[in-house]
Image (cartoon, rainbow, N blue to C red):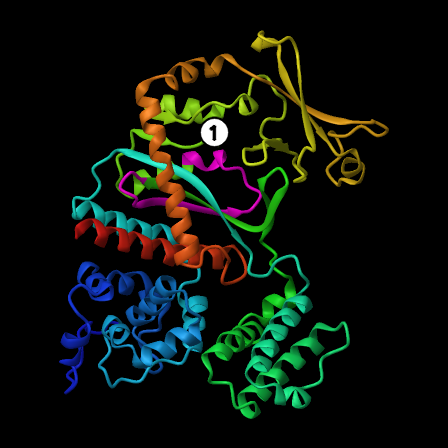
Amino acid sequence: MIRKQQTLVLSPYAALYDIVVPKDNMLRQINELVDFSFIYEELEKKYCLDNGRNAIDPICMFKYLLLKAIFELSDVDIVERSKYDLSFKYFLGMAPEDSVIDPSSLTKFRKLRLKDMNLLDMLIGKTVELAIEQNILKSNSIIVDATHTKARYNQKSPQEILQDRARKLRKAVYSMDESVKPKMPIKNTTNELQDEIKYCQRLVTFIETESRVAQVPKILEPLNLLKETIEDDVEHLRLAADPDAQVGHKSADSAFFGYKTHLAMTEERIITAAVITTGEKNDGKQLQTLIEKSQAAGVEVKTVIGDTAYSEKDNISYAKNNELELVSKLNPNITQGTRKKENEFLFNKDAGMYVCPAGHMAIRKARQGKKGVAKNQTNTYHFDIEHCKRCPLKEGCYKEGAKSKTYSVSIKSAEHSEQAAFQETEYFKTKTKERYKIEAKNSELKHRHGYDVAISSGLLGMQLQAAMAIFAVNLKRILKIAE
């Protein structure tokens, strides 16, 4: 039986909650705002109902993950805090004297219960439903943008990752007690990953049993991070740094290794849709999906606001065919015109360059044609010929012996004439000013909810992280507006 009554059990200490968890406490407000019984409905098929011992209440487990997203703590630290933080225990539906779960249960819950669930769309849909019930959504515009998240395991080798985290742990210990230095386990000197894992395990054991500083908060964070890496994530270390993460570009000379989250948000700053992709994916190609997901969540969409990445021909046509206003300024660099292979060579608006099917970015561009005669002008993008010579996709793209590889794009096409006129209107200019809101939301996700770095490996882990973080920020926004 996984369904349990979500009220506090009888306890002689229950009255403490009325004293230490005031009505304006955020966790109390979330409990009052959200009916978490939908968790039972979504997870019922994931549990065996007639065999084995009773499972930990899935609502309690889900709330632990929500607390992680809100307070940006590790599994170990979130469980540790729930031992003594009565606002946490109140939120989790526990009596003050109840014992807490083992942190390893959270890992199992994520891997066994939440696997194969469309948690991202479900949780966004629940918050949008709440916002509609609270009469918060009044606009019929959505703002779209993408934000990047660096992979937890970057392009360092697995051994380098372990060495880096072990080094940070040793440094923290030495700052507290240098006398333990001679007693520390001897560092691994081989190039074998398994030997590095064994060394890290010995280091953790030594610090926990012999260093006398293991419980100092300054030591606990790097200690828990190393433990989590060699215990929970060792399978990923053996396979690859992060097999799903890819290189994306923030500008022409700035790149990152990780993922992109493509977001849609109302003018009231409620996120209505999200798509998680690898880092190299084009922003504009996700627009139609974001619109359709927002509509499926219950949002009436009439206007879409975005930067120049979303003004490509397909999106303009889609908006027109669906009677939507696309407030996205044209950029000559992204007009489709009569260019060839338009679905293979994609424009990166941050770098201002095209990227070839193999993921290589153009190194420079040049304009050709007579000035003032737009229909005859093109931008020609030049690629690094040395990459082309070695490229596994060169067949049909690069001709052997060629001294250059270029890709040309006409600067303006007839399809954009109507959009060009629209962007000169006062309505367009007014709506464009709303775009800053989603940039602020991206910043909130990164700096208050740990969204700048992935907490696990792979696209599935990134989708779970996105689901909990967006659920948290939407709930906080609903509470803020409802004040």
Residue 55 visible? The answer is no
**Mark 1 neighbour class, 10 Å CA radius: few under 14, some 14 to 19, many 20 or more:** some
Q: Residue at the spot x=49%, y=37% of the render?
A: 283
Query: Residue 77: percent from the left, percent from the top?
Result: 41, 75
Is residue 452 found left or right of 248 in the rendered image? left
Q: Residue at the spot x=15%, y=83% of the render?
A: 10
Residue 134 highlighted magenta (yes or no): no
Vertical placement of residue 108 versus 259, above or below: below
Q: Residue at the spot x=69%, y=76% of the render?
A: 196
Given the image, on which type of amino acid does mark 1 rest? Thr
For mark 1, what is the residue?
A: 308
Query: Residue 215: percent from the left, percent from the top?
Result: 46, 85
Is residue 59 found left or right of 259 in the rendered image? left
> Quarter of the image holding residue 231?
bottom right
Q: Nearer the viewer, residue 62 or 14?
A: 14
Q: Residue at the spot x=51%, y=23% of the render?
A: 331
> Quarter of the image holding residue 300?
top left
Query: Residue 410: percent from the left, percent from the top?
Result: 60, 17
